[in-house]
Image (tube, helix red, strand yellow):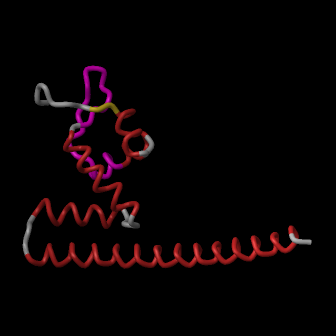
Amino acid sequence: MIRDEVMYSIKEVSKKFEVSYDTLRYYEKENLLTNVQRDNNNRRIYSDNNLDELSKVVHLRQLGATISEIKRMMQLFNEKIDVDSYDEGIAFLKRLNEGLNQKIASIESQKAFLHEKITRFTNERNKLDGM
């Protein structure tokens, strides 16, 4: 551990990223978080590098990536960086983007449904008010 390096407790990291302690431990077990240090009391402490790793994992999970897909991306870019690695990474990110576009379309459809129902209920209510 480098002196003067800011380190974060599991509680701080859990709160910042809105993930459970168990999730943090699981990501460490799956090697998605690497080189997590321990303090003098054997409690996990996280570096800025760990937070950068976690940010990537959390974003990719929110986008629908599986743990194995995230591991694959980390493996590609930690072991070798070549054209094939970039092509695989780009294809993966495009799949996530397409999934996100589908979710957005679904939410937009739900919003339109709600808007139509609110309008209808408001009009019906106003008719009762006018009686």
* Residue 103 percent location from the top left of the image: 47, 74
Outermost front residue: 130
Rendered residue at 37%/79% (across/down): 98
Q: Quadrant of residue 45?
A: top left
Say if the magenta span includes residue 60: no
Q: Main secondary structure of the magenta part?
A: loop
User: From the viewer's perspective, is 20 left or right of 37?
Assistant: right
Work out which quarter of the rendered image holds the N terminus and state it.
Answer: top left
- Specify the quadrant of the image occupied by residue 5: top left
Tell me: residue 67, above or below residue 40: below
- Quarter location, residue 75: bottom left
Find the magenta span and give its range.
27-46
| Residue 14: x %, y % from top left | 40, 40
Image: 3 above or below 34:
above
Horizontal side, residue 54 vs residue 80: left or right: right
Q: How far across and how far down the image is residue 31, in percent? A: 27, 51
Q: Is residue 35 left or right of residue 20?
A: left
15 vs 109: above or below? above
Screen quadrant of the C terminus = bottom right
The residue most toward the top is 40
Name the residue located 17 percent from the left edge and 78 percent from the top edge: 87
